[in-house]
């Protein structure tokens, strides 16, 4: 005697429409933004000129290159927003620090579109 099927297997159930997935760069941008935040905070609290500032600017630029490689301008803007939003009262200054370091990077905003 054959028993009737009384359970529905999960793989047999119809699947609904899949939720749109986030861009792959969103996960990659988190550690980049965290490192960028540390670098910008060091620039904010340190001297305004000298070899240390140049080293920090070079490191900030490398993080911009990493963000660009991860997702282009959209990823770069997302990293900048995370850093700026971390301290609303210093957002404009942080934006200028990053914008200066990222000037000339492929896909970064031209001079006339700066806020």
Image (spheres, helix red, strand yellow):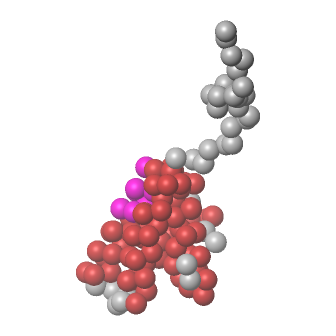
Residue furthest toward the left? 51
> Extreme top residue here?
1
Query: In the image, what residue occupies the spot 72% across and 25% down?
Result: 6
Magenta range is: 62-69
Q: Does the magenta portion include 82?
A: no
Q: Quadrant of the N terminus?
A: top right
The answer to if 66 sits in the magenta stretch is yes
Residue visible at 74% across and 34% down in the picture: 16
Q: Position of residue 114 (x, y in %)?
A: 60, 68
Q: Nearer the viewer, residue 90 or 6?
A: 6
Q: How many marks?
A: 0
> Is residue 61 at all visible to an observer of this figure?
yes
Quarter that holds the C terminus: bottom right
Q: Main secondary structure of the magenta part?
A: helix
- Please give the name of the residue rendered at 55% of the width and 78% of the height, measured from the top-left corner: 86
Which quadrant of the view contains residue 37?
bottom left
| Relative to 8, 105 lies left or right | left
**Picture layout, residue 36 above or below residue 66:** below
Residue 100 visible here: no
Residue 112: % across, % down: 61, 65
Q: At 43% from the left edge and 82% from the top edge, which residue is drawn?
A: 41
* Between 4 and 74, the one nearer to me in the picture: 4
Looking at the image, is 56 positioned above or below residue 12?
below
Residue 67, position as x, y percentages in the image = 45, 56
Horizontal and vertical percent for residue 35?
39, 70
Q: Is residue 45 above or below residue 32?
A: below
């Amino acid at each position: 005697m054959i028993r009737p099927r009384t359970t529905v297997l999960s793989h047999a159930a119809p699947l609904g429409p899949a939720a749109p997935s986030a861009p792959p760069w969103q996960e990659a941008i988190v550690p980049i933004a965290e490192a960028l935040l540390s670098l910008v905070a060091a620039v904010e609290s340190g001297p305004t000129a000298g070899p240390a500032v140049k080293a920090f600017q070079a490191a900030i630029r490398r993080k911009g290159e990493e963000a660009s490689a991860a997702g282009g301008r959209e990823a770069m803007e997302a990293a900048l927003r995370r850093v700026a939003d971390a301290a609303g009262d210093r957002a404009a200054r942080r934006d200028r620090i990053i914008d200066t370091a990222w000037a000339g990077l492929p896909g970064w905003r031209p001079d006339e579109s700066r806020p």
